[in-house]
Image: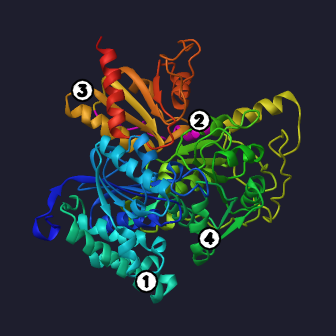
Amino acid sequence: MTTTNEREPTVIDEHIVEIVSDSGEGAQKCGQTFGAISGKMGNGVWTVEIIPAEIQPPARSPAGASGNRIRVGNRYVTNMGNEADLVVAFNEQVLFSRVASGAYKDGTIVLLENKWAEDPSEHIRQQYAGAIKEFADHGLVVHEVPMEVECLKIVSNARKGKNMFALGMMCAIYNRDADLARKEIESAFASKGPKVIQPNIDLFDSGFNYAREHLDFSWVIEPYEGDHEQKTIITNGNQAVGLGVMAAGMEMVSMYPITPATSASHYVAAVYDQVGGFVHQAEDEIAAIGFAIGASYAGKTACTITSGPGMALKTELIGLAVMGEIPLVIIDVQRGGPSTGLPTKVEQADLLSSIYGEPGDAPKIVMAAATIEECFHFVILARKLAETFRTPVILLTDANLATGVQPWARPELQEEWLAAPIDQSPWNKEVPAYDWDPETGLSQRPIPGQRDGMYVLTGLSHTNRSKVAYDSDTHQNSMYLRSRKLAAMQQTLNPPEIHGDPEGDLLIVGWGSTMGAIEEAVDLHRAEGKKVSHVHLRFISPLEPGLKAIFSRFKKVMTIEINYSDDLTHPLITEENRRYAQLALLLRAQTLVDVDCWSVVYGHPLQPGMLYDVIAGKLAGLNH
């Protein structure tokens, strides 16, 4: 066999690589490290975690697939891409769920651990042999690799080191900087000391050398042409959220652990003390938001981070924050539902509940981050808006952003991001606690402890002096003015930018983490001369201005979302009873435009190839 040492590597624009194993074998760390190495070498990178639904799924089972997908390109990468080009697998069974989900294509290369071919169990040997044949039938190109044998030459437990052997193979195949990789390994295991670091480096070197000596394919992906002088950092969305909390000057995060938001609190708790902040892990979701509201009422706007089920439990106290006009930042890292649903999978199903979830009318600001970088900057913006408009602000991210890793511009701390010191100057006794401006609904906020600024905080209907009042006029007027704050805030927004021409046949509207996949699919059609454009919304409540005018310039408007909607081709579904995707429903109500929708709830991020076909089908329908 020709080795990679004897031939020049092939230069390519991009590749998608997966590493898949049972839970606990380190495949996610391997994938994250490979992505970090590639990002530091100047490549565009996007990673997606492959996470089983169960905490401890059975070993060697399709349901137990755990790992990482890494898309590496010579340009800025914004999404997970389509089918993988190469996959490293520690057993054959975990690949079946990936094959079933369409993750691989005809010609995908599989580097497969071959220890199972000689397993003591006849059943396992038969499983392995059958899988090899089935993978060939699917068009996969399987290379059996003795990972266990090679790792046992270095460590006594290959399960604890196979991931670094796999990292070495991947770095050799894609001509990654081996010295940089070793530094990443040293950093990853720094807390463990030399006794752990050195064996992992040895395992990496073994995998690197094995690939060079035994595999006959090798590729190079050049750095993308950008501002290489610009400093970047490589984080996932939850880490970016944590950085945003600190950059915003918020000193307290209160939360209860919930997937996929938990890692945000883990990250913040590890570093928060360095900037004077602390994490409060409450006994439940209700206590978490109650603690945050108390801190915010006392003058320091706090943050609570959760996911969909946690949002449901926080509902009553969100209403209290609206009624009491207490600034509060709420971050919802969305996952699949309803109920506990798909804890580790992506969905965009909390949009309407975030806007309308509370009893009565509880207007609040709802934003949605579209990129990992926006996960950082939007937390800062959320605190500013919460304090300016004296209201809760909900920032929606999702599991795709939370666990995805991408290089982005390293932020330089700006003083204007930080919260201003608490105003403790004497309060004017003549000014009510809710001195609502009749045009904007805004009012200055007294702080407990401020001389003459004491007032009774209540969740009951109240006058501008916070006196409980049940009369019709008081209730109606306070509703007017709390709602007016959203109108005032909307007046500060610009119309959304249009990706593509300002008019045409089809306009795609999206929100959240779908932006990269939608834009890539739209650009493929535009390169073919199709009249397709895209608008991506960041503000959902209030909506960004000018949408009706933008929509009027296209023959058809359609949302693409990751939440449920009915398909008109399904039994019993008609134009009258069809359920629309959530943003589509909101846009139809707000603009009175016949906005169509396409959505799925497969539990994984959208792929540009899939969206290309969806758009092609919609365009074909318009032209008939």
Q: Is the C-beta separation of discs 4 and 1 under 8 Å?
A: no
Amino acid type of disc 2? Ala
Label 2 or label 1, whichever comes before in sequence order: 1
Quarter residue 619 falls in: top left
Foreground mark, 4 or 2? Answer: 4
Label 4 or label 1, whichever comes before in sequence order: 1
Residue of label 2: 487
Residue at image point 71% right, 66% down? 280
Quarter residue 284 falls in: bottom right
Q: Quadrant of the C terminus?
A: top left
- Vertical placement of 510 versus 458: above or below? above
Amino acid type of disc 3? Lys
Label 4 or label 2, whichever comes before in sequence order: 4
The disc label shown at residue 450, or none:
none
The disc label shown at residue 197, or none:
1
- Vertical placement of 96 versus 548: above or below? below
**Can you give x and y, in whole percent of width and height, for residue 172 in the image?**
25, 69
Residue of label 4: 269
Colouring rule applied to residues: rainbow
- Vertical placement of 162 versus 93: above or below? below
**Can you give x and y, in whole percent of width and height, for residue 156 in the image?**
47, 80
| CA distance separating discs 4 and 3 | 49 Å
Q: Is residue 57 magenta?
A: no
Say what secondary structure mark 1 lies in: helix
| CA distance separating discs 4 and 1 | 25 Å
